[in-house]
Image (spheres, rainbow, N blue to C red):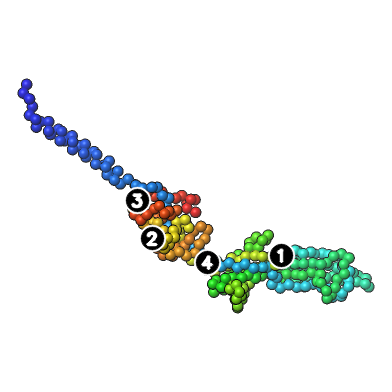
Amino acid sequence: MRPLPARSFSRPLVALTGLLLLSAQPVLAADDDAPKGPAVTVLKVAKSCFSDIVEATGTIIAREETSVRPERPGLKVIEVLAEAGDTITAGQVLARLALPEGGTLQVAAPVAGVIATSTAQIGGLASAKGEALFTIVARGEYDLVGLVATTDIRKLAVNQPATVRIAGAGDIDGKVRRIGPTVEPNIQQGMVYIGISSQKRLLLNASGRALIKTGQSCNVAVPLTAVQYSSAGTVVQVIRRNRVETKRVELGLMSGGNIEVRDGLNEGDVVVARAGALLREGDPVRPVMASAEAAK
């Protein structure tokens, strides 16, 4: 048998080699596009509204306190019909006193409100000029007289809403009623009066804290954990094309673990949820979107 020409084997071999190269190309391309670098948790920047809050700490006083005394002195108390802490109406009988000539004298509330103190005791004597039988917080209106930092006084205005927190009484809604005209020179703080109303007794001179809402700002926001403070300024790490970009930002108000970003980010930007010093500008990463719960 005559041997086949050598070139008869070359065509199938070249075709087979070309087929193997073609089949290998997609695998190599996929490897090139595969994410590299460490996995990092990221989130999309969204808009949020922040309240500008000024704090004032102080004590509770009665806005108007009314003393109740009998018209005739030296009469014995024979019946007590109200006590400290009671909410009363105008004209309500608080106690009865015995008259020397017989009969009784009724002691009535001149105003509605909350009884702050009472000295009325059965068998005791009531005095017209001495200690009052009852003191009433008229209409249940109180003031928190608080001190505010001088730098925050300019933000205050009458009728701004406030939340007043009083030990043992919880949170009560209030409003700025009056702003003091002067500043205490030794402590550089000014005085503000926060008006509150309560149908239950508040302890006079109790300490309290007012959170006064002086304004609102709506902007994009990020978690506090996404912000880094460095020699280059305040920065946030943004992910673009699976690489880290460091963006300088201007921050604003804070609330609930988030902070307002007034400049440097746009809604929809993807940022590293927990910025770290190990990530550098241009580093490749594998972004993993945070869940809604984890992002809070």
16 to the left or right of 132: left
Question: Residue 245's x, y, as percent?
Answer: 36, 57
Q: Depth-wise, is mark 4 or mark 2 nearer the camera?
A: 2
Q: Which mark is residue 226?
A: none
Q: What element carries label 2?
A: strand
Which image quarter: residue 73? bottom right
| Alpha carbons under labels 4 and 1: distance apart | 29 Å
The mark nearer the N terminus, 3 or 4, is 4
| Alpha carbons under labels 3 and 2: distance apart | 16 Å
Q: Depth-wise, is mark 1 or mark 3 nearer the camera?
A: 3
- Residue 194 appears in the picture as rendered: no
Determine whether 245 is above or below 143 in the image.
above
Q: Which residue lies furthest to the right in this view?
A: 101
217 to the left or right of 85: left
Q: What element carries label 1?
A: loop
Nearer to the camera, 13 or 267:
13
Q: Depth-wise, is mark 3 or mark 4 nearer the camera?
A: 3
Q: Which residue is drawn at 52% across and 68% down?
A: 215
Residue behind mark 3: 284
Nearer to the camera, 146 or 96:
146
Determine whether 225 is above or below 179 in the image.
above
Residue behind mark 2: 247
Q: Residue 52 carries which label?
A: 4
The mark nearer the N terminus, 3 or 2, is 2
Nearer to the camera, 4 or 250:
250
The mark nearer the N terminus, 2 or 1, is 1
Q: Is mark 4 on a helix, strand or loop?
A: strand
Question: Residue 272's x, y, as percent?
Answer: 42, 54
Question: Residue 237's x, y, as percent?
Answer: 40, 56
Q: Residue at x 71, y 63 (%)?
A: 200
